[in-house]
Image (spheres, coloured by chain):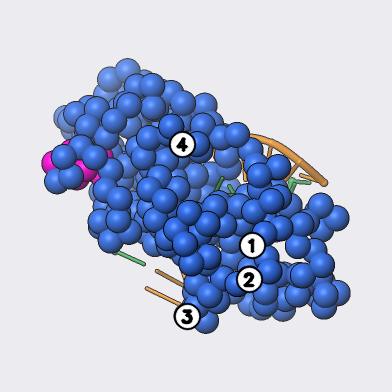
Chain colours: A blue, B orange, C green
Amino acid sequence: MSELWAPVLDWYDEHRRDLPWRGDHVSAWSVMVSEFMLQQTPVVRVLPVHEAWLERWPTPGALADDAAGEAVRAWGRLGYPRRALRLHAAATVIRDEHGGQVPSTYAELLALPGVGDYTAAAIATFAFGRRQVVLDTNVRRVLGRTLSGVEFPAPSVNRAERDLAASVLPPDEETAAAWSIATMELGALVCTASEPSCGRCPVVDLCAWQGAGRPAYEGPARKVQTYAGTDRQCRGRLLAVVRDAEGAVARHRLDVVWAIEDQRERALASLLADGLLTEPEPGFYALP
DNA sequence: GACGCGTGGGC
DNA sequence: TGCCCAAGCGT
């Protein structure tokens, strides 16, 4: 029995955001789409795209029956467009192997394209009420601070951290699911990465990090990815041209958005290799 | 386990 | 401005 449970659950009841992928009437597909979109992308940017997506493709089968390129186009500027391809691929597996129904177990979900440990646990928990350890960046930070007394968790999850998270997961399914979403929400709204609002935290009196005087992070340097000038930025530019066009676009229309030729050619080749672009005829590029 | 993978907002 | 951050995954 963790003393964190009650105050965190009470806090969630009062302060939770009313998001469209939460609630009793929400489909598992809506939850799944949200989890894909929320991988590394903030809630406020996901909201409008998620709404349009569910309107256009209300079921996995509807998406699977459409072209993958339409998924890439509808993904818009959410970033990491390979997620759109993987969501389409996952929808196809669901249509063909699961009778069109999003599977409900962690193992079945984990087998889907684009679904890793976090996403499988999140869908199983939030869509189906299963009892799983949901270990995302928010939960890791909250548990790191409250239980381990560190400002930030290690770069990657290790066995001890997973065991610790499992040890504080409530034993019954319903409470476990509530605990996971409440802890994530606390991390997102209060126990934030920078400038946490400890004055508004329901467990500030129990927090090991607070009790230790909020010591600064001492682990290995947290990597901040560069972006300007990278292949990734180049890929984004090239894909945007095709995404915003109607049919196939000629090579010269790509040439003008990135000046460095060898980098541009490398990025174009990688987009083709990833399946984000096709070359229907030599020198012309289109969505798949 | 490290790395590559988009994009935009806040300060 | 440049840095930091945002519900990770696949290789």
Residue A24: image tag: 4
Image quarter (top left, top right, bottom left or bottom right) of the N terminus of chain A:
bottom right
Image location of residue A90, percent across then percent down: 26, 45
The three-letter code of the residue at mark 2 reads Ser
Image position of A83 with respect to A216: above or below: above
**Start-end of magenta stretch:** A89-96
A246 lies left or right of A175: left
| Residue drawn at x 52%, y 57% as measured from the top left | A175
**Labels 1, 4: one chain:** yes
Q: Residues within 10 Å of mark 2 (few under 14, many from 20)?
A: few
Q: Give the secondary structure at mark 4.
A: loop
Host chain of mark 3: A
Host chain of mark 1: A
Q: Is residue A115 visible?
A: yes
For the view shown, which residue lies furthest in the left direction? A96
Depth order, front residue of A171/A146: A171
Residue A58 painted magenta:
no
**Disc nearer the start of the sequence (1/4):** 1
Asked if marks 3 and 2 touch (Cβ < 8 Å), the reply is: no
Viewer-side label of 3, 1: 1
**Disc nearer the start of the sequence (3/1):** 1
Image location of residue A61, percent across then percent down: 22, 32
The residue wearing badge 1 is A5
